[in-house]
Amino acid sequence: MDVICAKQWDACVSKTLDGLEQIDKGRWITVYYEDFITDPVAEMARILDQLNVVHNRDVIADAIQLVRTKKTDKNGRVIPNVKVAEIISPTLARLGYGVRK
């Protein structure tokens, strides 16, 4: 099942990245999961700023209290899978993983 999900993720993300190349970069925003869980209030404020939406950081903080801040499954386990990594690594590289930070 993990491999099927990885292939589906890879196909969807690859097509999305291909499509974004056709759109002016000023019209979309990249949000990295790691950045969002590290500081969800700041990232949400950045998203709302991009959309020109007036916002209040306290309201944002209240609204996103349930954001998970750990890379685990619902049972608290990190999920390693070599085959999945092989499938998604090229697309992750396109997204800047392994290069950024």
Image (cartoon, grey):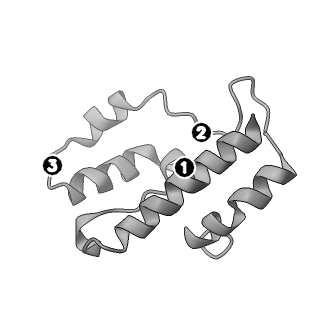
* Disc marking residue 69: 2
Q: CA distance from mark 3 to mark 1?
A: 22 Å
Q: Name the amino acid, label 1.
A: Thr
Q: CA distance from mark 3 to mark 2?
A: 25 Å
N-terminal of the pair, mark 3 or mark 2, is 3
Quarter occupied by the N terminus? top right
Depth check: give the residue in front, 38 or 89. Answer: 89
Q: Secondary structure at mark 3?
A: loop
* Residue 89 seen in this snapshot: yes
Residue 16 x %, y %: 43, 59
N-terminal of the pair, mark 3 or mark 1, is 1
* Residue 101 seen in this snapshot: no
Q: Secondary structure at mark 1?
A: helix
Q: Which residue is mark 1?
A: 38
N-terminal of the pair, mark 1 or mark 2, is 1
Q: Quadrant of residue 74?
A: top right
Q: CA distance from mark 1 to mark 2?
A: 7 Å
Q: Residue at x 23, y 66 (%)?
A: 27
